[in-house]
Image: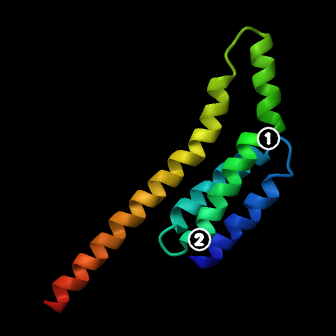
Amino acid sequence: MKALAIIALIFSALSVFIPVGGVFIAMFCSVLALITFYKSPTLSGVTFGINVIATAFLSPSIMATAATMHSNGEDGVGLYWFYVGFHVVLFVLAVLASMILKKRASKKQTATAG
């Protein structure tokens, strides 16, 4: 699992520099970080952080699409919040799943000890 978290971190860092496909690579890396969050929360948390910052502030494709939508009379803010919210929701799910699994493991450990 640690190797998968490292791969997600590396590709997440590389997705910052890829103009159009970087947003989708970052989304894939967030899914990988969700999977690996229980075993390596530090690497996965850094991956989520890079993805949120890159998507929110450094993604020219989202800014260009939102600007085009705005000039056509559409609301481009929904598109922006979809991409940023995707990473935030996956991070919250990862934290909740990790807490549930740790609680379940501690219950199992106390049941076998008692």
Front residue (pair 100, 20)? 100
Is 25 on the left-hand or right-hand side of 19? left
Up-down relation of residue 65 to residue 92 (above or below): above
**Looking at this rendering, what residue extends furthest in the top direction?**
73
**Looking at this rendering, what residue extends furthest in the left direction?**
114
Is 59 on the left-hand or right-hand side of 9? right
Q: Which mark is residue 78?
A: none
Up-down relation of residue 9 to residue 18 (above or below): below
Do the residues bearing badges 1 and 2 touch, measured as CB atoms within 8 Å?
A: no
Which residue position holds label 1? 59
Q: Nearer the viewer, mark 1 or mark 2?
A: 2
Front residue (pair 63, 2)? 63
**Alpha-carbon span between mark 1 and mark 2:** 24 Å
The residue under the point 82% across, 41% down is 20
Q: Amino acid at mark 1?
A: Ser
Which residue position holds label 2? 42
**Looking at this rendering, what residue extends furthest in the bottom direction?**
113
- The reply to whether residue 39 is visible in this rendering is yes
Neighbour tally class for label 2: few under 14, some 14-19, many 20 plus, Cα within 10 Å: few
The residue under the point 33% across, 64% down is 100
User: Residue 57: x and y, percent?
Assistant: 76, 41
Looking at the image, tell me whether mark 1 or mark 2 is earlier in sequence order: 2
Q: Amino acid at mark 2?
A: Thr
Instruction: Choose top left, top right, bottom left or bottom right for residue 61.
Output: top right
Is 55 on the left-hand or right-hand side of 106? right
User: Residue 97: x and y, percent?
Assistant: 40, 61
In the picture, which quadrant includes the N terminus?
bottom right
Front residue (pair 15, 46)? 46
User: Residue 11: x and y, percent?
Assistant: 75, 62
User: Residue 98: x and y, percent?
Assistant: 42, 65
The residue under the point 47% across, 70% down is 38
